[in-house]
Structure formats: C-alpha cells, structure tokens
Amino acid sequence: MAGTSPTLWLAPLKGLTDAVFRRTFAEHFNGFDRAMAPFVTAVAAERLTDAHVRDLLPGADGATPLTPQILGNAAEHFVAVAARLHDLGYTEVNWNLGCPFRPVSKKRRGAGLLPFPEAIDEFLDRTVRALPMSLSIKMRLGRTTPDEIFKLLPVLDRYPLTQIVIHPRTARQMYGGRPDLDTFESCLALSRHRIVYNGDIVHVAGFKELQARFPKVDEWMIGRGALADPFLPAAIQTGADPGPDRVRRFKAFYDDLFDRTGERLSGPGHLLDRMKGYWTYFAAAFMGGEALAKQIHRTFQLPRYIDTVERFFQEEAVWRK
C-alpha cells in the first residue's frame, strides 16, 4: 500500500532476462525483490527434458526469488511442465497471457487467447485442480481492444490465483503508445485478486505518479526501464543517488554479462545477436547512445563489435542525466 516499501519485480523479457542476466544484475545492482523468468513453452510430458527448463534449474540464478512462467493453451501440457518445475523446488508458476507477438498470438497462445474467455475458463478449470503449486497470471488488456479484459476478470475471479500482473496495453499496441491507465484503474475495482502493475516504469518521478494514482497497488514490475537504467530499481526503493561512477559500475556489470553469456551460448554469432538485443536498451543510458546502437546493429563480426564497445567506454561514455 501507499506509504510502505513497494515490492519490485524484474519483468520477463524473452531472450534477454535469462538466468545469466538475472544473476549478474543482482550481483551489481539492488532494488528487485523478485523476478519472473521468461516463458518456457508447454510441451507434452514425453518431450520434457532438462534442456527445456535449463534456465530454471537450481543454482542457475542468484538469490533473487524467481517465479517461472509457462506459455501454452493445452492444460495437460501446462500441468506437465508445472509438475517438473515443482520437482525443481518451485511453489508457484505464472501463466503467460501477455505475449503480443503474432507467431504466438495467432496460435491462440499468450495474448492471442484473451478474446476467448470460455477457452480460458476451460483451461483454468482443468489446470488449477491438477497443479501441485500456486498459479498467477500475467496478461494484457486484450488482443485488439482494451475492453476484452472486462469479460475475463469475472472468469478469473472464480479461481484461486495468487495475483494478476496487468500490462495495460493490447497486443496490437505491442510496446508502442501509452499504457491505458484508465482501464487499468477499472480493473482494480473489478477484480478480487491482487493486481501487479507492469508497463513503462522508466524513472522515479513516473513511478511516484503511478503509485499516487494507484494506492492499492503495492507490487510493480519493471522490464525495459531497468535495462535502460539498472540503477532505477534501487532509486525507487531508497531514493538514493547512485553517485558519479555510474559508467564504471555499468561497465563492470556489462563485462561480466558479456563473458558469462559467451560461456553459455554456442558461437560468436549467437553472442553478437544477444548483445545487440541488450544494446537496444542499454544505449538509452548514455549520451549519444542512439548512434552507438546504430553502429552496433550494423556490425556483423564479433571482434569489430568488441572493439566498438570498448572504444565507446574508453572515449565517449557519459551517463545520460
């Protein structure tokens, strides 16, 4: 509630906030109380191997408590993966109803399932009774229109969910446009469940405005904002200024992330692609970062990428005020 310390979650960003990133981030920065892992896809029990849940194996993460997430629309497959995660020690799993990407949504998975409340009801009826653990949901307002959520909330109220994470955009919006705060506010009044806010928390002042508008919300999820400014979660929690050595601290984090990601991925091409994904967000932290991001994305050889980044840190890197 307002006046108490907020609970901050690291949001799941597929291909970015994996176990290597989560562990490295926690070693260098403070502020996150919990993390949600990027989704694993629900599969039949006979196809389930350790490789499928590699990012969630014990010891892969640091000390930040983690909730795994599953994407799928087949109850029996969802339960099979959840049971494996329960065997690994997890006590809660999240159902992804928020992924907006067309290859996912056109198969009625992720946000693509939101226009079908009857299908969601059937899925939950079959799943909740079979799960060996608690269930939460992460969702958007709808696939094409924000009012789709109003047909879903009464359905969700029938089930013992631990919480609902709402990103107040539609899948059609992807990550563009403004979050629909009016519809989010309506959801708070219409749902009996604990609601977690997720979307466009990018600076302390903006967070305080959201916190003042939604005093009943005490858990908040931050994704892209924390990649663009890894000092943001701690600044929200404590109000403390990270000081003048932000570039040095970020560089130490980046070096560890680069080395560890390289150890995990196979081949320079995969490492380069992953780093390009990170710099889509990292670049926003620096003066002139847009030019660096363009230069990185035009680079197709790992040695050249390494030279470009090292030269930037040595000669140009200035933290954006």
Image (cartoon, rainbow, N blue to C red):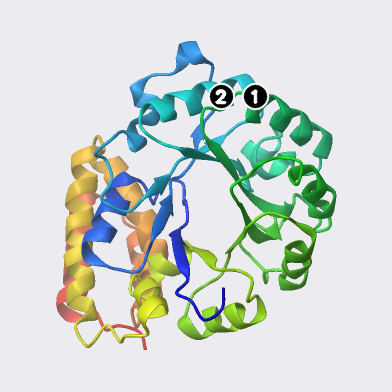
Horizontal side of 274 relative to 75 (left or right) equals left
In the depicted structure, whether residue 174 falls above or below residue 83 = below
Look at label 2 and name its amino acid: Val
In the depicted structure, whether residue 187 falls above or below residue 265 = below
256 or 280: nearer the viewer: 256
Q: Residue, x 37% and y 85% (percent of image)?
A: 239
* Label disc, if present, on residue 239 of the rendered structure: none
* Label disc, if present, on residue 79 of the rendered structure: 2
Dot 1 falls on a residue whose secondary structure is helix
Look at label 1 and name its amino acid: Ala
* Residue 47, image x, y percentages: 46, 14
Q: Residue, x 65% and y 75% (percent of image)?
A: 214
Dot 2 falls on a residue whose secondary structure is helix
Q: Quadrant of residue 312?
A: bottom left
* Label disc, if present, on residue 75 of the rendered structure: 1
Crowd around label 2: few <14 · some 14–19 · many ≥20 (10 Å): many
* Residue 171, image x, y percentages: 69, 52
Q: Quadrant of residue 240?
A: bottom left
Q: Is residue 304 visible?
A: no
* Residue 173, image x, y percentages: 69, 59
Horizontal side of 259 relative to 64 (left or right) equals left
